[in-house]
Image: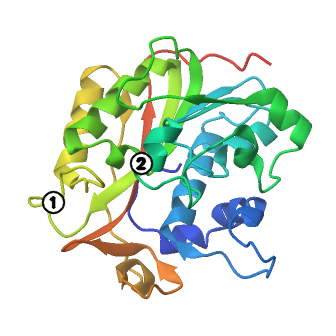
Amino acid sequence: MLTSQMCKRDVLTSDDFVRWAERIRPSWDFDHTGVPVLVHRKMWEWLFIIQALFERGMLQPGRSGLGFGVGQEPLAAVFASFGCTVLATDMAEDRAREIGWTSDGQFAADLDSLNKYGLCDPAGFKERVSLRTVDMNDIPRYLSGFDFTWSSCAFEHLGSIESGLQFVERQMRCLAPGGVSVHTTELNVSSNDETVDEPGTVLYRQRDLRRLALRLRLRGHKIDLDFKPGETTDDQHVDVPPFSNVHLRTRVQEYVTTSYGLIIAKRGRRRAPTG
């Protein structure tokens, strides 16, 4: 079963991940060229979240999902195509415009932008997906009872390392007992001591995520961490401008960073789908 992991090259070429990559091909192969699956960390993030939820029985009619900081990612449409009811959330438009996220596909301006690749039939999408403004630092209490929650490299933008950790803890309240939460974020692979912890993009260290795991376990939730690095040349390559077609690690300031996945099961017994 899929767990949190750092190695990505072998994962992206596995049968399961290739099938998911083909399913969402319109979202990354814009010119319909038929190129092989991209060896790219954003691709890994999307496929990691999809596979984690699929393995845990979340992608089926009657399940409900809540996404945070969705931008124009393809995930809401994919989940809706399985019959899930989805509430997608993003920041307020004035805030997105202030930080420059309204012009590069990182902000969900309207519902149609979440299905612009046609990954879900339009009628089913409009029936099952809704969009709402939510501040990830102040999640409304009424958002609760979901079967699953997710975010794709979003909580490292909440202002500080601690703000992101608190978000992960708070959003667990949005889940029904036994629900599943899947998130990806930035991981500093250069240092477990020094890092970036300031507004913009923070870089989590292993010790930060271990601290988060301890806090979650103390609340009765289940989480496993896997920090095994990839052994392939592609996994070890650090991609810097001008970027290449292998982009699993890059550099932020003086640190090398990659994407990391978290899978958390809320305490309690999981309910059956309602559909």
The residue positioned 76% from the left and 48% from the top of the image is 115
Q: Is residue 16 above or below residue 162?
A: below
Q: Where is residue 31 in the image (x, y as percent from the top left)?
A: 78, 77
SS of the residue at dot 2? helix
Instruction: Name the image quarter holding residue 262.
Output: top left
Residue 117 rendering spot, x and y as whole percentages = 78, 57
Residue 42 x/y as whole percent:
52, 63
| Residue 78 appearing in the image | no
What separation in Å lies between label 1 and label 2 (alpha carbons)? 26 Å
Query: Which one is closest to the eye, mark 1 or mark 2?
Result: 2
Using the rendered view, name the quadrant where residue 163 is placed. Answer: top left
Q: Which of 258 and 29 is in front in this view?
A: 29
The answer to whether 265 appears left or right of 62 in the picture is left
Res. 80 in view: yes
Q: Is residue 114 above or below residue 245?
A: above
First-in-chain label (1 vs 2):
2
Q: Is residue 127 left or right of residue 137?
A: right
Most foreground residue, 85 or 49: 85
Q: Residue at x 42, y 24 (%)?
A: 172
* 202 to 262, vertically: above or below: below
Number of callouts:
2
Q: Identify the amino acid type marked 1.
A: Thr
Tags 1 and 2 touching, CB below 8 Å: no
Q: Name the residue under label 2.
A: 98
Q: Residue 195 carries which label?
A: 1
Q: Is residue 112 left or right of residue 207?
A: right
